[in-house]
Image (cartoon, rainbow, N blue to C red):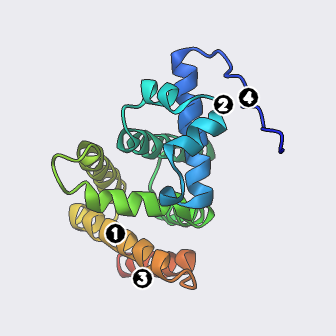
Amino acid sequence: MQAQTARPRPRRLEASERRREIIEVSTQLIAERGYRGVSLDNIAEACGITKQGLLHHFRSKAELLVAVLEYRDEVDLAESTRRAPRSLTRAGFREEIRESARRSIARPGIVQLYAVLSAEALDPEHPAHAYFIRRLNWTRELLRQGAVSWHPDPEGFAIELLSFIDGLQLNWLRDPSIDLEARALQYVDRILAEYS
């Protein structure tokens, strides 16, 4: 008869600390396995809590997935701000695109989660619908402001760049042999050369 592995006793954490732990563990598991390869049971087990304990903090997997995407945005913004003041000068803009591509390459599961949820969230009833509207508006405005000093149509540029990057990432998910970083930089270099 095989010995059963004892489940680790849950550590007592404040609610905010437990939520943060669940989000961080979920982010790591999704990055490793893809979001379809991770269940709430997997996440709860990795956190040393029950599924019911997890559902006390997040009412559904969809709600947790939105929290993972918000956490990813928070971490990405912190990394970007730490490297340099938030500025999209021409040189800074190119470097931001490079770093964004590298982050995507390092965590294809998170990119897949973003791509799938963004399509599902076109439905206004989807729990992630408001998140994607907020994120679109925020990134579009950030790019528009950064391009005001050098691009004749900053609003059009922001929409065009976001559309290109989203499309490139989808194709990279389908065919990982596509060099995501190189293709993103080639595109950006063409734009920068056109408006030099």
The type of residue carrying mark 2 is Gly
Mark closer to the chain start, 2 or 4:
4
Residues marked 2 and 3 touching at CB (< 8 Å): no
Closer to the camera in the image, 160 or 167: 167
The residue that label 3 is drawn on is 190
Query: How far apart are the two marked residues, 2 and 4, measured between alpha carbons?
Result: 6 Å
Q: Which residue lies at the image location 48% right of the left edge and 45% below the top edge? A: 86
The residue that label 2 is drawn on is 48
The type of residue carrying mark 1 is Leu
Query: How far apart are the two marked residues, 1 and 3, measured between alpha carbons?
Result: 12 Å
Residue 54 appears in the picture as rendered: yes
Closer to viewer: mark 4 or mark 3:
4
Closer to the camera in the image, 16 or 144: 16
SS at badge 4 = loop
Residue 8 position, x and y percent, is 73, 28
Mark closer to the chain start, 4 or 3:
4
SS at badge 1 = helix
The residue that label 1 is drawn on is 161
On screen, residue 121 above or below 63: below
SS at badge 3 = helix
Q: Which residue lies at the image location 56% right of the left edge and 24% below the top edge? A: 18
Residue 29 position, x and y percent, is 60, 50
Q: Which residue lies at the image location 63% right of the left edge and 58% below the top edge? A: 32
Closer to viewer: mark 1 or mark 4:
4
Residue 92 appears in the picture as rendered: no
Residue 9 position, x and y percent, is 71, 22
Quadrant of the rendering where the N terminus is positioned: top right
Residues marked 1 and 3 touching at CB (< 8 Å): no
The residue that label 4 is drawn on is 8
Closer to viewer: mark 2 or mark 3:
2
Residue 26 position, x and y percent, is 55, 44
